Image (spheres, grey):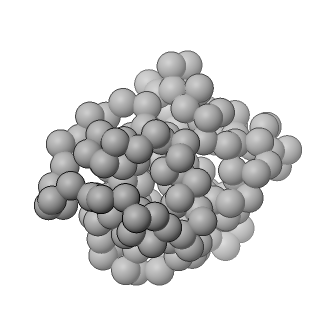
Amino acid sequence: MTRAYNEDYVFGAMERLGCMMDYAENAIGLDAAVFWRYFISSGVADLFGSGHPRYLAGMSGSELARLVVTTVSDIKLPDGNDAIIYPGDAYWAGWALAYFQWYTGLSFRYIETHGMDIETVLSLYHPLHEADISKFVETGLSRINCK
């Protein structure tokens, strides 16, 4: 399988999407599901998933979140880009979905609409957040019938 970007970038991508989700929820105050749909509809998800360097490695998670929000809404954003990260379910969902998207090569939109919507991913936090990422991949593949 050809992946959009080199494996060397995966961990950074996972951290960025995790931080993006955390910032959206805890600094901006958006529900994770609402923000994830903003992420997909903004076009940022496609650019990130295709390995565009500006989005994959050139922006922090909070910068990505701010870009997404300003692209699709008129929500007033808090001053500054810094965020205190609370690695909870929103962080984990972004972190895990970044890996899953890279691993499968599927678009975030496809993943969202074929059985791994953000609510489902968030519901998997307690059984899977301490498991190896391969368990999340296995669960995701079985849900979207990509075995």
- Give residue 138's quadrant in the image: top right
Task: Please determine whether, in this image, residue 142 is positioned above or below residue 50.
Answer: above
Q: Residue at x 23, y 41 (%)?
A: 85
Pick the front one: 9 or 75: 75
- Number of numbered discs on residues: 0
Task: Please determine whether, in this image, residue 143 is positioned above or below residue 39.
Answer: above
Quadrant (top left, top right, bottom left, bottom right) of the N terminus: bottom right
Q: Can residue 18 be seen in this view?
A: no
Q: Horizontally, is 44 left or right of 14 in the view?
A: right
Q: Horizontally, is 111 left or right of 119 in the view?
A: right
Task: Please determine whether, in this image, residue 32 is positioned above or below residue 82.
Answer: above
User: Furthest residue to the bottom?
Assistant: 53
Q: Position of residue 122 (x, y in %)?
A: 55, 32
Q: Position of residue 139 (x, y in %)?
A: 69, 34
Q: Which residue is drawn at 44% across and 25% down?
A: 130
Pick the front one: 133 or 17: 17
Q: Position of residue 120 (x, y in %)?
A: 65, 33
Task: Please determine whether, in this image, residue 1 is positioned above or below residue 141.
Answer: below
Q: Which residue is drawn at 41% across and 44% down?
A: 30
- Give residue 82's quadrant in the image: bottom left
- Give residue 145's quadrant in the image: top right
Q: Is residue 37 visible?
A: yes
